[in-house]
Amino acid sequence: MNSEPDIIDELDHARAQEYALLATLLVRNPDADVLRRLALLGGDDSPLGAAHAALGVAAASASAETVRREYFDLFAGLGENGLMPYASFYLSGSLYGRPLARLRNTLQDLGIERVAQSEPEDHAAVVCEIMAGLTGGAIPAPAGTDRAFFKAHVGSWIRLFFADLEKSNATAFYTHVGAFGRVFIDIETEAFAFAN
């Protein structure tokens, strides 16, 4: 029989995997191997299960080259369908704004050092990776830190980003990434609100 801490650990592990998957899909375009593994995603009748299944179907029908072009058009190119996956942009309308400064202060308080990277820390992939670490225990922190981090640096903007990604008409694969992210963030938001 599972004890309550085991159930919580199992749920936190599953949450960490969801955040890690989102981080993986947002930090760079998935290669053919990642797409093959994503194609194995199944689902159930829940909203998250349906989002998983749809992402799996999209991965099965996508080529690595098509997804690479989608990623470039969305996140690296200057096209009309491009998105800015940064908290600063969503919260202040500009890059490198106060949301990034606040996030950097929090990361310093948590003892998380910046790794040499091309993206600022308020990139959607980076905050999802941090949430994966806090939730799954890879980043040591007091209990409840994931909730505080979500409230301070994630929940106020990332759902809108995923909704925008979901509505991006120029993509076939990343609309499903957006739907998956939006559904997962809705679940997280509700769970954190219930925990208050």
Image: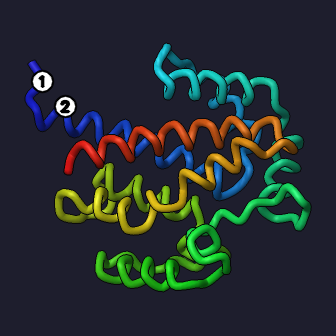
Q: Is residue 112 above or below residue 48?
A: below
Q: Is residue 113 above or below residue 173?
A: below
Name the spot of residue 73 as percent of width and height, x first: 86, 56
- 39 vs 130, left or right, is right
Q: Residues within 10 Å of mark 2 (few under 14, many from 20)?
A: few
Residue of label 2? 7
Q: Residue at x 88, y 50 (%)?
A: 69
- 6 vs 137, left or right, is left
| Res 32 → quadrant | top right
Q: Residues within 10 Å of mark 1 (few under 14, many from 20)?
A: few
- Look at the numbered discs 2 and 1 and tell me whether their residues touch, using CB distance below 8 Å: yes
- 3 vs 107, left or right, is left
Q: Residue at x 58, y 79 (%)?
A: 116
Q: Disc 2 versus disc 1: distance between alpha carbons?
A: 7 Å
Q: Which residue is nearer to you in this view: 183 or 129?
A: 183
Q: Residue at x 49, y 14 (%)?
A: 45
Name the spot of residue 31 as percent of width and height, x first: 74, 44
Q: Amino acid at mark 1?
A: Asn
Res 2 label: 1
Lower position in the chain sequence, tag 2 or tag 1: 1
* Element type at mark 1: loop
Q: Which residue is nearer to you in this view: 85 or 64?
A: 85
| Res 147 → quadrant | bottom left
